[in-house]
């Protein structure tokens, strides 16, 4: 062939490099993985089999398998079977593991048996980023996203879904029984074949009904009235689409370099109770005392905002609009201005709503205000259909008012939140593929998520510092395991 770039003849004998190190350049990310793992105190982190057994077959050192997994997640190779193949043919992995080729069962068991330690490694890299000064801005964005579990939607049951499924099975049985009555009208040969086929379907449906009744018994014993057959910890969660059976992954991302400072996997589908928890983890990860926390309106809960404020953190969360008056086109609570000096509200008509009484509802001290002039007010039709327009004020409402003022003074805060925290989710889900998690149960899924977060942070820091810069930083920092720091972050 002329005028084409041609390859070498396959039968040509060549002298390959004598050293495997010649195949891996100095700027290859695999060298960072090697240096990082070698600097870790694996025994203190909790890895098993760090010290070899006196008797029995020799095992692989945990550092070898940890390097294998970090490399795999950096290169979108999460499956233990695929890692087994890559270890046999991938030159970078040959260099990283010293030509060791563990089988897939050994690789899978390492991830299963060292979940807590692997999660500690992920937090340890966050500690490294903190020491390198990558969290200079004391601001993080918090959000949650739904990730698919191994459990299929057809193998997840709620009370309503189970009842609907049982009705469908019962309807199918009745339909087939009616079809049996008409089968005898056919010719004998056709009737016999049709009857046998219908009997098989009815038998299968009755077995399915029996299984559903057994599931109903187990379902009534669960506290949240939901059961998943494949992954018992997975839960059905609402999304913008049809909903999924999976987990709700919470993350806190710093607004400067978009590094994931903290993350947590939950099987609770709503975010309202996660603000203080994630903000506290983010403050420990960044090492700052006063932290500004950005979150969307899904995190708006009065008690959580108060706890976050009292813990010394500054939340910025937009208020959820749940007022029936606003939905009906009438004046909302925002139209009533509170005067702290007189402890009164002023309405759009200029009337004063004075304090009437206070009582505890749902564990919250609520104060009631209204005016005696509502009946004669010209704006009453736009205000309330009742006799008086009553305004409720929480005893810690001043905290919510101060947060709303901060939000008004920083109108771009929600844009910053969106640009900061949603990008990591999209990147990680792209790496995961259509089936997000490969493991089952909450602890193992948390381990898998920690590996994804570690890989994401790895790539971000490499982009910031470069390969050589990160390697020099890791080697220079001798305190890669700090017991006190990790106790604060929840490792020990």
Image: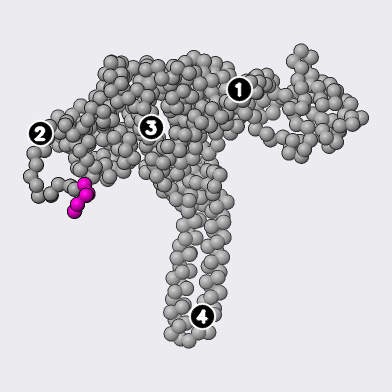
- SS at circle 4: helix
| Disc 3/disc 2 C-alpha distance (Å) | 34 Å
> Does residue 411 appear left or right of residue 480 in this picture?
right
Residue lying furthest right: 376
Which residue matches tag 2? 18
Task: Check disc 4 and report the residue beneath it.
Answer: 183
Label 4 Cα neighbours within 10 Å, binned few <14 / some 14-19 / many ≥20: some
Asked whether the beta carbons under mark 1 and mark 2 sit within 8 Å of each other, the answer is: no
Q: Residue at x 28, y 40 (%)?
A: 108
Q: Assess disc 2: are there few (<14), some (14-19) or many (≥20) residues with their C-alpha within 10 Å of its C-alpha.
A: few
Q: Is residue 359 left or right of residue 420?
A: right
In the image, is residue 13 above or below residue 403? Answer: below
Question: Taken as a whole, is the magenta stretch helix, strand or loop?
Answer: loop
Q: CA distance from mark 3 to mark 1?
A: 29 Å
Residue 324, compared with residue 355, is above or below; it is below
Of labels 3 and 1, the one closer to you: 1
Magenta stretch: give its range: 1-5
Q: Nearer the viewer, residue 366 or 417?
A: 417
Q: CA distance from mark 1 to mark 2?
A: 61 Å
Separation (CA) of disc 3 from disc 4: 63 Å
Q: Which residue is mark 1?
A: 410
Q: Is residue 360 above or below residue 483?
A: below
Q: Position of residue 1 (x, y in %)?
A: 19, 53
Q: Magenta stretch containing residue 4, yes or no?
A: yes
State which quadrant residue 353 falls in: top right
Q: In the picture provided, is 118 more to the left or to the right than 195? A: left
SS of the residue at dot 2?
loop
In the image, residue 11 sits, relative to residue 95, either above or below, namely below
């Amino acid at each position: 062939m002329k005028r084409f770039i041609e390859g070498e003849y396959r039968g040509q004998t060549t002298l390959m490099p004598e050293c495997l190190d010649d195949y891996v350049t100095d700027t290859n990310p695999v060298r960072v993985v090697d240096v990082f793992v070698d600097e870790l105190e694996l025994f203190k982190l909790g890895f098993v089999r760090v010290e070899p057994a006196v008797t029995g077959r020799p095992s692989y050192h945990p550092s070898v398998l940890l390097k294998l997994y970090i490399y795999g997640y950096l290169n979108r190779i999460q499956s233990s079977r695929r890692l087994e193949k890559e270890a046999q043919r991938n030159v970078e992995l040959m260099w990283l593991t010293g030509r060791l080729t563990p089988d897939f069962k050994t690789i899978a068991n390492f991830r299963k048996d060292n979940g807590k330690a692997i999660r500690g490694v992920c937090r340890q890299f966050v500690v490294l980023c903190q020491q390198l000064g990558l969290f200079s801005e004391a601001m993080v964005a918090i959000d949650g996203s739904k990730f698919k579990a191994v459990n299929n939607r057809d193998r997840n049951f709620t009370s309503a879904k189970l009842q609907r499924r049982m009705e469908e099975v019962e309807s199918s049985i009745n339909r087939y029984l009616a079809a049996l009555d008409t089968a005898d009208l056919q010719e004998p040969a056709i009737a016999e074949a049709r009857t046998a086929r219908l009997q098989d379907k009815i038998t299968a449906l009755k077995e399915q009904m029996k299984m559903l009744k057994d599931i109903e018994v187990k379902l009534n014993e669960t506290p949240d009235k939901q059961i998943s057959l494949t992954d018992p910890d997975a839960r059905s969660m609402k999304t913008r689409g049809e909903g999924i059976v999976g987990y709700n992954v919470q993350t806190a991302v710093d607004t400067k370099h978009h590094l994931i400072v903290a993350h947590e996997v939950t099987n609770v589908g709503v975010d309202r109770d996660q603000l203080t928890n994630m903000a506290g983890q983010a403050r420990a990860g960044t090492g700052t005392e006063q932290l500004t926390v950005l979150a969307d309106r899904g995190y708006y809960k009065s008690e959580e905002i108060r706890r976050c404020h009292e813990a010394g953190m500054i939340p910025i969360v937009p208020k959820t609009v749940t007022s029936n008056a606003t939905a009906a086109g009438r004046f909302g609570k925002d139209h009533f201005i509170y005067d702290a000096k007189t402890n009164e509200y002023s309405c759009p008509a200029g009337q004063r709503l004075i304090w009437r009484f206070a009582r505890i509802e749902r564990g919250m001290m609520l104060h009631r205000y209204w005016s005696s002039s509502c009946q004669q007010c010209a704006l009453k039709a736009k205000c309330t259909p009742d006799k008086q327009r009553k305004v409720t004020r929480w005893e810690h409402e001043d905290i919510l008012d101060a947060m709303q003022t901060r939000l008004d003074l920083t109108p771009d805060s929600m844009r910053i939140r969106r640009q900061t925290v949603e990008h990591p989710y999209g990147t990680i889900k792209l790496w995961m593929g259509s089936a997000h998690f490969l493991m089952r149960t909450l602890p193992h899924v948390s381990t898998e998520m920690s590996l994804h977060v570690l890989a994401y942070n790895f790539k971000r820091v490499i982009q910031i510092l470069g390969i050589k810069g990160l390697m020099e930083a890791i080697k220079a920092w001798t305190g890669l395991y700090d017991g006190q720091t990790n106790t604060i972050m929840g490792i020990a």
